[in-house]
Image (cartoon, grey):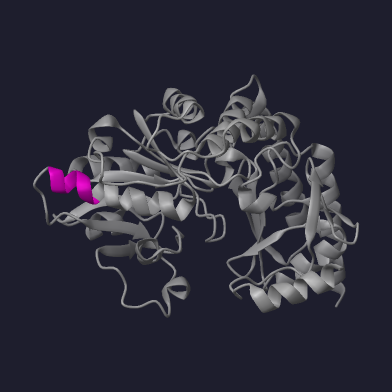
């Protein structure tokens, strides 16, 4: 069977929940992937920021194969050595005292919301469950994380919404302060809004958010599902803004493409999850944790994150050069290897045209092209992507 046969089977047997690109990827190496027809593509999507170390990374592949040969899954009824090692690496290199493992970003955010409620319940503040989130945010597709997500298009059709959430403009501390009530338990916010179009906070914003939470006695929860794990040139994006949260959620890049998520918290909050209050059958299983340990050790190796920062600056500079040349680019924004350009018009056609030139890009927020390559991307590969995008923008400008 060829790819057309498999795509036809997909249409028959798989839920139609994705607007899939009409190619089937079958192999990858580094920052490059190949489809079933043998054509190669430079990958600037990285599984939506999940393939931290690219494709076929030797150390990651070996860790997964070695662990699969020993033990894939046993459940959290037992102690799991790679999981313990992963927890130590996360705690030793963050604000947190404890880690809980799950499988995805939505699951991590759902668990964080539960943790917030349980924390205040244990304190006898049973009416304190309100969570303030940001307009244009994205926190997942479970019912609670949909209610937390500040984009109506994702919530439409799933009413009634889970109560207890309100949304304020991202980057507006005055609006946040006005939204806080005696019932507010937490503020849930992304350091950079990823699915919302790689929107950056204004200078000083997070210091004000942290101060407001501390003054009102509510918890600060940072959704670092997309921004964490070295994506911005720091291990966690909030390090760029000089603040620490009470709770942080992670996923996507944690295990280099193997499903893994986590909730990190300070001890005083983490203790609200006692035995029987929360669980995840596959969370932090031996296979995912072995992959996660390898990713963490690589990120923490000498010079790795510094190189991510430098390559992010290079990518930004090249995108700004394009913006100077093409009037259709309204804005360049982002941090590290999480960059974007906002176009004057919808970007789906641009994404498809760049793919025809052998580069995979992601279109989000309708008119934003997002650049989230593997963290191992080279400057030469950045140049290759820029050349393809430049040609597409040139062609579009002539039509």
Q: Residue at x 31, y 77 (%)?
A: 160
Q: Residue at x 58, y 39 (%)?
A: 255
The answer to whether residue 85 is seen in the rendering is yes
User: Magenta segment, principal secondary structure?
Assistant: helix
Is 225 situated left or right of 13 in this image?
left
The percent position of residue 210, horizontal first and vertical second, equals: 31, 41
Is 206 situated left or right of 358 in this image?
left
Is 99 situated left or right of 31 in this image?
left
The answer to whether residue 204 is seen in the rendering is no
The percent position of residue 4, horizontal first and vertical second, equals: 83, 73
Is 194 situated left or right of 177 in this image?
right
Q: In this view, does 353 lie above or below 331?
A: below
Residue situated furthest right in the rendering: 38
Q: Residue at x 61, y 76 (%)?
A: 16
Q: Nearer the viewer, residue 81 or 30?
A: 81
What segment is highlighted magenta in the picture? 117-122
| Quadrant for the N terminus in the image | bottom right
Q: Nearer the viewer, residue 253 or 175?
A: 253
Q: Which of 179 and 381 is in front in this view?
A: 381
Q: Is residue 284 above or below residue 342?
A: above
Q: In this view, does 134 lie above or below 115?
A: below
Q: Quadrant of residue 8?
A: bottom right
Residue situated furthest left in the rendering: 124
Number of marks drawn: 0
| Quadrant for the C terminus in the image | bottom right
Q: Does the magenta stretch include residue 119?
A: yes
The percent position of residue 107, horizontal first and vertical second, equals: 42, 53
Q: Does the magenta stretch include residue 360?
A: no
The percent position of residue 222, horizontal first and vertical second, equals: 39, 45
């Amino acid at each position: 069977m060829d790819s057309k046969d498999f795509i036809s089977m997909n249409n028959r047997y798989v839920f139609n929940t994705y607007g899939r690109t009409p190619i089937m990827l079958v192999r990858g190496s580094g920052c490059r992937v190949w489809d079933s027809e043998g054509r190669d593509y430079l990958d600037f999507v990285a599984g939506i920021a999940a393939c931290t170390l690219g494709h076929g990374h030797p150390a990651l592949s070996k860790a997964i194969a070695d662990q699969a040969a020993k033990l894939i899954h046993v459940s959290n009824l037992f102690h799991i050595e790679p999981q313990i090692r992963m927890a130590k690496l996360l705690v030793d290199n963050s604000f947190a005292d404890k880690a809980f493992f799950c499988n995805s970003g939505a699951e991590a955010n759902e668990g964080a919301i539960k943790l917030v409620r349980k924390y205040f319940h244990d304190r006898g503040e049973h009416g304190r469950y309100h969570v303030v989130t940001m307009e244009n945010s994205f926190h997942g597709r479970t019912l609670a994380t949909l209610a937390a997500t500040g984009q109506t298009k994702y919530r439409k059709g799933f009413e009634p919404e889970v109560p207890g959430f309100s949304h304020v403009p991202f980057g507006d501390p005055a609006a946040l302060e006005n939204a806080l009530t005696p019932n507010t338990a937490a503020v849930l916010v992304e350091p950079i809004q990823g699915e919302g179009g790689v929107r950056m906070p204004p200078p000083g914003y997070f210091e004000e958010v942290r101060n407001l939470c501390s003054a009102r006695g509510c918890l600060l929860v940072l959704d670092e599902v997309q921004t964490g794990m070295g994506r911005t040139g720091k291990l966690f994006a909030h390090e760029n803004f000089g603040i620490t949260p009470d709770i942080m959620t992670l996923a996507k890049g944690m295990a280099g493409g193997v499903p893994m998520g986590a909730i990190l918290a300070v001890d005083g909050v983490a203790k609200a999850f006692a035995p029987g209050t929360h669980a995840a059958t596959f969370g932090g299983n031996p296979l995912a944790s072995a992959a996660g340990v390898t990713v963490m050790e690589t990120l923490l190796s000498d010079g790795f994150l510094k190189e991510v920062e430098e390559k992010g600056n290079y990518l930004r500079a090249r995108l700004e050069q394009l913006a100077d040349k093409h009037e259709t680019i309204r804005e360049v924004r982002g941090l590290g290897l999480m960059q974007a350009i906002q176009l004057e018009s919808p970007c789906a056609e641009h994404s498809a045209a760049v793919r025809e030139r052998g580069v995979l890009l992601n279109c989000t927020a309708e008119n934003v092209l997002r650049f989230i390559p593997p963290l191992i991307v080279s400057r030469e590969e950045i140049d290759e992507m820029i050349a393809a995008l430049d040609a597409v923008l040139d062609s579009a400008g002539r039509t």
